[in-house]
Structures are given as structure tokens and as C-alpha cells.
């Protein structure tokens, strides 16, 4: 296993260390969790899901708590769903939902992501269950409840 320092040296020299999903265009090495997440979010917004996943994966060793890991898994799940890798996305959303001490916003986001993924799979009954859980969950904020209700009404 290559050390972080060795990978950083290779990255500075412009040599691929095999750290991204698409070698040859490796994502930059990040030194903070927030930098990796911000870069991933920017790439995701630009519809560059594979590159976003590479940035998000670099955030994992930089995380400080379970909620940060869940946040990365949630973002990876969204990327996978966008890439039509729905089964893999559902596994990550379920992992997030099983996280102990998860913040309510992350819980609601995972349910919405899971519901959206079920919609892509044309499984409306499972999607509606997820959206209904967001609406009925006491910890869901008003924005999440409204989004989930809109998705239910869209049915």
C-alpha cells in the first residue's frame, strides 16, 4: 500500500498513482475533508460524477466522525445513482440510514436519495415508502418534508 506522502509526491510530479476512478486524470490530493467535499460538490454540479466520486473518496481518510463518513457515503450514493449504478447506490443509502447518531438532515437526505433511486428503477411503491418516511420523521426539517411531499404528490 502506497503511503499518503508517496502519493502526494507522485501527484506533484504529475504521475498517476492510481487514486481515481479514471487513471490518467487523477483528482488532486486534498489535505482537508472540507476541501475534498467542496471539490466533489463542484464536480457533481458540473455533471462529472466519476470525478466527483474520486474527490469524495479522498475525503474518507480525512474524516473526523461517523456523520462525516455518512455524508461522504450519501454523496457517493448520489453519484452512483446518477451513473445508473442503482444497486450500489442503494447499498450506500442503506449504510447511511444504519449509522448510529446520524444527524436528522443526513437521515432525511439518505431517504430521499434512496427514494429517487427506486424511482429510477421504476419501483414506485418503495420510493413512496422512503418519501413518506421523510414526511413522518419528527427530525426532518421543513425543507426536506416539503421536497418529499412534492415527490409524493408528483406520483
Image (spheres, grey):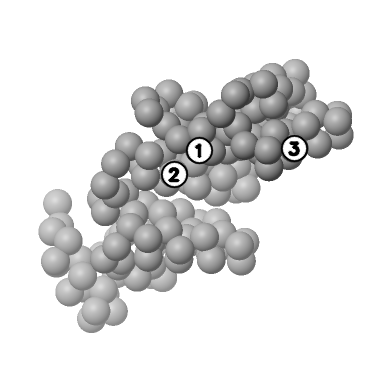
Up-down relation of residue 82 to residue 149 (above or below) = below
**Closer to the camera: disc 3 or disc 2?**
3
The foreground one among 132 and 82 is: 132
Q: What SS does tag 3 mark?
A: helix
Q: What SS does tag 1 mark?
A: helix
Residue 93 x/y as whole percent: 51, 32
| Label 1 environment density (alpha carbons within 10 Å; few <14, some 14–19, many ≥20) | some
| Label 3 environment density (alpha carbons within 10 Å; few <14, some 14–19, many ≥20) | some
Residue 47 picture quarter: bottom right
- Name the residue that disc number 3 marks: 146
Residue at the image position 61 percent from the left and 66 percent from the top = 46
| Label 2 environment density (alpha carbons within 10 Å; few <14, some 14–19, many ≥20) | many
Residue 123 x/y as whole percent: 73, 24
The foreground one among 105 and 3 is: 105
Q: Is residue 46 left or right of residue 102?
A: right
Picture disc at residue 106:
1
- Name the residue that disc number 2 marks: 71
Could you tell which of marks 3 and 1 lies nearer the N-terminus? 1
Q: Mark 2–mark 1 contact, CB under 8 Å?
A: yes
**Separation of disc 3 and disc 2 at Cα?**
21 Å
Residue 138 x/y as whole percent: 60, 24
Up-down relation of residue 91 to residue 13 (above or below) = above
Residue at the image position 29 percent from the left and 62 percent from the top = 32
Amino acid at each position: 500500500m502506497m503511503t499518503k506522502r508517496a502519493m502526494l509526491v507522485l501527484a506533484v510530479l504529475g504521475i498517476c498513482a492510481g487514486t481515481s476512478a479514471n487513471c490518467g486524470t487523477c483528482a488532486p490530493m486534498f489535505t482537508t475533508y472540507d476541501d475534498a467535499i467542496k471539490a466533489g460538490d463542484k464536480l457533481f454540479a458540473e455533471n462529472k460524477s466519476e470525478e466527483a466520486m474520486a474527490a469524495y473518496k479522498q475525503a474518507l481518510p480525512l474524516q473526523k466522525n461517523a456523520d462525516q463518513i455518512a455524508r461522504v457515503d450519501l454523496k457517493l450514493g448520489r453519484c452512483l445513482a446518477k451513473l445508473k449504478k442503482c444497486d450500489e447506490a442503494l447499498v450506500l443509502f442503506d449504510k447511511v440510514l444504519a449509522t448510529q447518531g446520524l444527524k436528522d438532515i443526513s437521515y432525511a437526505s439518505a431517504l430521499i436519495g434512496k427514494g429517487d433511486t427506486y424511482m429510477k428503477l421504476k419501483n414506485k411503491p418503495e420510493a413512496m415508502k422512503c418519501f413518506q418516511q421523510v414526511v413522518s420523521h419528527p427530525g426532518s426539517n421543513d425543507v426536506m418534508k416539503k421536497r418529499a411531499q412534492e415527490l409524493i404528490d408528483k406520483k
